[in-house]
Amino acid sequence: MKADAARTERHVVGVIDLSAGAVSITAGSLLAAGVGDMSHSDRVGWSVGSFVAGGLLTLGGVVTLLVPSNTEKGYQIAFPAPSLRVDVGVAPAPGGGTLQLTGSF
């Protein structure tokens, strides 16, 4: 079904974005720490650029994972999931009480 495919694609893209963000932030950290053979001004520029790119990729990955696609939203509107029903019962009993929790989903 298209909604499942859209959700799977969204999750894959989100994980790829998060991974690329982690790699970029790691590269920025290594450059800032002095790894590699670069001039100081090049090192600062590349490390700042890597940090910014890593932050943007990480933010994009989080948003991608949390915000459903239009296909998913349309499917949820067309075929709403059954509501979760929870019932709570409390009754006095000798020496205390009873609590009963039941639910259907």
Image (cartoon, helix red, strand yellow):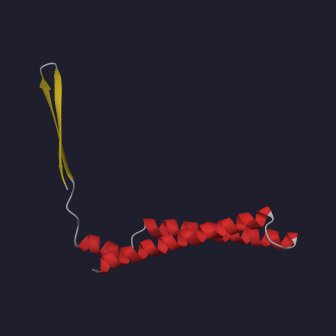
The quarter of the image holding the C terminus is bottom left
Q: Position of residue 15 (x, y in %)?
A: 49, 70
- Which image quadrant for residue 40? bottom right
- Which image quadrant for residue 11? bottom left
- Between 34 and 63, the one lying in front of the other is 34
Residue at 79% across, 72% down: 45
Residue at 33% across, 72% down: 73
User: Does residue 60 appear to the left or right of 90 in the view shown?
Assistant: right
User: Does residue 46 appear to the left or right of 58 in the view shown?
Assistant: right
Q: Position of residue 7 (x, y in %)?
A: 37, 73
The quarter of the image holding the N terminus is bottom left
- Between 22 and 73, the one lying in front of the other is 22
- Between 48 and 75, the one lying in front of the other is 48
**From this viewpoint, which residue is outermost toward the bottom?**
2
Q: Position of residue 57 (x, y in %)?
A: 58, 71
**From this viewpoint, which residue is outermost toward the top?**
95
Q: Position of residue 4 (x, y in %)?
A: 31, 75
User: Does residue 69 appear to the left or right of 97 in the view shown?
Assistant: right
Q: Is residue 26 above or below residue 8?
A: above
Residue at 65% across, 70% down: 24
Numbered label tally: 0
